[in-house]
């Protein structure tokens, strides 16, 4: 079948924003589709699975995957030896959260399933290919905009920072001008049933998400975990518990309803700076303050690390290094960021020897010490979506 998309002019959101900043109106008017993306901590994530076990039992009273408690049901599957479960993205056991569990499953790793029934435990090592139904549902994803947070008092544990948020520090979420909802008319009819990419898997917008507001819209999204890419999803430790990050990309049409949104850049997008306790407004900042010329990944110089100089090759750096121990995504392998690096900035914050350095900017004059959104992943999935549309693999 002929690819109808090949005649359309498709660009990524960063390409569009460069045109906007360069006042290239003629080029902009020729564009048909813009692929936009966002990546960040999205607490409202859960998985729905049907897990077959090796033995039959009456029905599961409790169920775990790699030690993480799952919600059993609603279907009882009596005497079938299989279990329907939902798993909240913020569920965790010790330092292992569901975000890490989902990432492991999508990466093809085996996990341990345990069903508890009538004082007996049924156990099975299983991978995602053996789980026939595994759908991810985001109950609130891709917030158009969020808030930045600071602290006016004593240090406080919060889901918005890896370590207790101190007075005079700031944290923020949101990909600003890259965010799909920032670039489109968010009327229900423009969103419901729209095809998207969720963590690399083709999915669909189910409707508005929880805590939706006209000023701060978000989406309810679903996609099949079997076709996801583990690069785009994972766990994110905070000082108040386990969190999960996801990546969403959406094609946006260049039309009269969307154009005024597509022309918006970071400097024009409000990012309210609020107190973490009570959320009262302190100052109206912009995403330009947070993102303009900021480093997206840390620079690393292990020659500055005292422990690295004297440890033997068999001793992992994590025994000594606070940056390795506190990395929210467990991305520092012997001090070197892996592909799981999120660009949050924590390593630069906690390392006192200057091994890690990042330009993180400030918000309202308050230094940013933690980021909970990742423009690297957002842009990568935007480019992937563009490629699939051009190849005819993603039908508009």
Image (tube, rainbow, N blue to C red):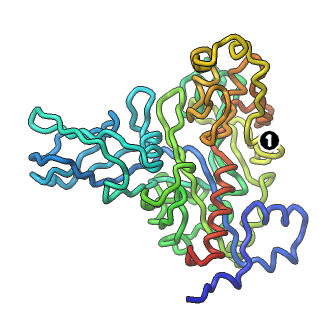
Tally the marks: 1
Work out whether residue 66 or residue 371 is closer to the camera in this orientation and state it.
66
How far across and how far down the image is residue 334, in percent? 63, 26
The image quadrant where one finds the C terminus is bottom right
Instruction: Check disc 1 and report the residue beneath it.
Output: 294
Q: Is residue 274 above or below residue 230?
A: above
At which x and y percent is residue 196? Answer: 54, 66
Q: Is residue 69 left or right of residue 386?
A: left
Q: Residue at x 55, y 89 (%)?
A: 1
Depth check: give the residue in front, 1 or 311.
Answer: 311
**Direction from residue 245 to residue 46 in the image, left or right:** left
Residue at left offset 62%, top offset 55%: 144
User: In this rendering, does residue 362 appear at all?
Assistant: no
Q: Is residue 347 left or right of residue 278?
A: right
23 left or right of 330 in image: right
Q: Quadrant of residue 307?
A: top right
Quadrant of the rendered image containing residue 392: bottom right
């Amino acid at each position: 079948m002929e690819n109808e998309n090949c005649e359309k002019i498709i660009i990524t959101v960063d390409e569009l924003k460069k045109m906007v900043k360069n006042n290239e109106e003629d080029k902009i008017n020729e564009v048909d589709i813009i692929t936009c993306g966002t990546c960040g901590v999205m607490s409202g994530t859960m998985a729905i699975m049907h897990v077959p076990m090796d033995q039959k039992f009456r029905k599961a009273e409790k169920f775990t995957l790699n030690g993480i408690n799952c919600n059993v049901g609603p279907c009882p599957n009596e005497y079938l030896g299989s279990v329907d479960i939902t798993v909240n993205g913020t569920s965790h056991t010790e330092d292992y959260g569901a975000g890490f569990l989902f990432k492991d499953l999508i990466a093809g790793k085996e996990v341990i399933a345990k069903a508890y029934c009538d004082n007996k435990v049924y156990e099975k090592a299983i991978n995602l290919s053996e789980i026939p139904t595994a759908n991810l549902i985001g109950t609130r994803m891709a917030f158009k905009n969020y808030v930045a947070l600071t602290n006016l008092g004593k240090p406080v544990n919060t889901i918005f920072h890896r370590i207790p948020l101190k007075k005079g520090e700031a944290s923020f979420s949101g990909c600003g001008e890259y965010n799909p909802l920032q670039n489109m008319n968010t009327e229900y009819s423009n969103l419901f049933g729209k095809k998207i990419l969720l963590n690399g898997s083709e999915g669909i917008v189910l409707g508005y998400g929880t805590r939706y507001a006209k000023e701060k819209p978000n989406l309810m999204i679903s996609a099949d975990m079997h076709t996801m890419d583990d690069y785009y999803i994972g766990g994110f430790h905070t000082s108040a518990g386990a969190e999960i990050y996801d990546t969403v990309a959406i094609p946006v049409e260049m039309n009269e309803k969307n154009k005024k949104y597509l022309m918006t850049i970071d400097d024009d997008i409000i990012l309210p700076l609020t107190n973490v306790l009570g959320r009262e407004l302190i100052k109206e900042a912009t995403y330009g303050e947070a993102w303009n010329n900021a480093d997206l990944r840390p620079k690393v110089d292990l020659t500055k690390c005292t422990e690295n100089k004297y440890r033997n090759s068999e001793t992992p750096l994590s025994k000594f290094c606070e940056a390795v121990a506190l990395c929210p995504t467990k991305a520092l392998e012997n001090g070197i960021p892996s592909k799981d690096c999120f660009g949050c900035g924590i390593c630069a914050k906690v390392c006192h020897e200057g091994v890690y350095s990042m330009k993180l900017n400030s918000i309202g004059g308050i230094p940013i010490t933690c980021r909970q959104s990742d423009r690297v992943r957002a842009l990568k999935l935007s480019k992937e979506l563009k490629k699939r549309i051009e190849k005819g693999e993603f039908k508009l």
